[in-house]
Image (cartoon, coloured by chain):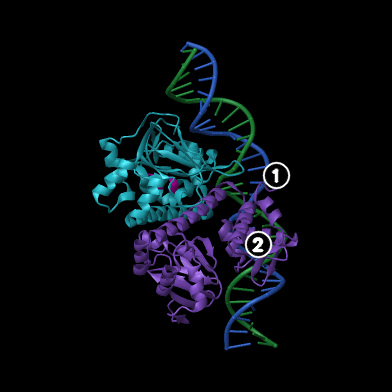
Chain colours: A cyan, B purple, C green, D blue
Amino acid sequence: MGHGMSEQKTPSQNTVRAICALGLVRGLPSEVAAHVASLARVDVLPGGAGVFTQGAVAQRAYAVLVGAVRIRQIGSDGAQALMRMIAPGEMFGTVALFTEGYYPADAETAMPSHIASWSKADFMALTMNSPQIAINIIGMVGQRLANVQNRLREMATQNAEQRIAHALLMLVEQSGAVQAGVCKICIPLRRRDVAELAGTTLYTASRLLAAWEKGRLLARSRQMLVVRDANKLRRIAQGGLL
Amino acid sequence: MGHGMSEQKTPSQNTVRAICALGLVRGLPSEVAAHVASLARVDVLPGGAGVFTQGAVAQRAYAVLVGAVRIRQIGSDGAQALMRMIAPGEMFGTVALFTEGYYPADAETAMPSHIASWSKADFMALTMNSPQIAINIIGMVGQRLANVQNRLREMATQNAEQRIAHALLMLVEQSGAVQAGVCKICIPLRRRDVAELAGTTLYTASRLLAAWEKGRLLARSRQMLVVRDANKLRRIAQGGLL
DNA sequence: CAGAAAGGTTGCGCCAGCGCAAACCCGGCA
DNA sequence: TGCCGGGTTTGCGCTGGCGCAACCTTTCTG
């Protein structure tokens, strides 16, 4: 962001429609949604572009309209963890506006993307003026909290194989496109991404994913993963051999 | 809860003051805070009493006024994880009111406690009618989200020793009382609690804590832990030997 | 005060998975 | 066409910490 990439202040037709479909404006009359859309700035970014960096003062709230974003946190010791992948229709970087004001992680595009964003002032004003928007935000954040808590429990109790399976299932849930009985995860994933999502190492992730590809359970298409047997994956995510 | 334990509908003086100090009503005029307090029910519970159970329909939002509460999640495989300990002044069970409506974990008192609670209807009405309350809730949930994300990263990248040290430091932050240079964690903690908080096993936690007690780093007072050398603990939480 | 129950400690063996190192694959570019 | 760089695969050795089992200590309860 901000390197003067191709950027448009005037949301196009498609863009407005995408913004009006956001969870943020669920349950609101369409003129309010349109107003929210009118306040948005839209950036068109190439893959691998930074959107914000960990520790920076939070000045905008973001949503992915097209593409995908990686949210990665780096510890004081340099260790990295992938907190989440953002798919179209999801927001990110919003919580920091309401807490102590610093982004807790890095955000970068994982592929060419259209990113909508609102200034802190506009966003807070929207929240103050519409209880429904406030409640939608609580719902979104609450959903994320529940999700992260689940991952935390899995991290604490399950082995690497189960965690990776869960990570894939979560991604399917989030951005799966079903076609011809198989399910494609429409987010580009490196081995490293999967490893960091599941809290394991590149090596372990590579070994397991490669094995699953050999077992006709997974496949690769372009840079994306295709789940060919979701049920088997689910079984692995549960007891494993059980 | 609800076994007809000693329970009072009319909040006492102290109780009202405790409720008015909640983060929930931060920045609000005192008459609003008083109104919030007037809507609360207060239960006086013994230690080990259940407040709500995982999977139950969420009907109330809670706050601890006196005592402590354990929030524990159980996976479909039966594995348990301690999501958090709740100290006086903190709320719990609130998020479920805004999401899909089921409590995602068990809550039980870890010692004799006074628990305030609000009905879903009242709580939602408060949120709808006061943007400030809504924003306070977003802030509280956002704080928790940041906290859980940090734990998730630590879980993924650090070893058991570091994680346990972090867990203790978090508890100190949350409920530490400094006296005579040492810092007492005012929440009763079993070995098992520490283990589940840090995502390790009872055995490993016991070994490490015992070693730290031998090293004059920790001590036990009643059922609670006393941190005698917070700096050393912090050093362990970071690089360890480094 | 005895007995039970719950919690805590510790020795020991074992294995999941970490992580280095080296090779391989593949797309982009001069 | 060959080279470069990022990503991936895989062999191998090593170890953190899991988890059983047995025992000890403290706290309830009648």
What chain is tagged by disc 2? B
- When the figure is inspected, residue B233 is found, relative to residue B111, above or below; the finding is above
In the picture of the structure, the residue carrying the numbered disc 2 is B206
Q: Report, in whole angstroms, how far the alpha carbon at label 1 lies from the one at label 2.
A: 24 Å
Magenta-colored span? A166-171
* Labels 1, 2: front one: 1
In the picture of the structure, the residue carrying the numbered disc 1 is B242
**What x and y, as percent, mark residue B219?**
70, 65
Q: Nearer the viewer, residue D5 or A242?
A: D5
Q: Nearer the viewer, residue A210 or B98?
A: B98
**What x and y, as percent, mark residue A46?**
41, 30
Q: Which image quarter: residue B60?
A: bottom left
Answer with left or right where residue A210 lies relative to residue A123.
right
SS under mark 2: helix
**What x and y, as percent, mark residue B151?**
54, 52
- Image quadrant holding the N terminus of chain A, namely top left
What kind of residue is marked 1?
Answer: Leu
What chain is tagged by disc 1? B
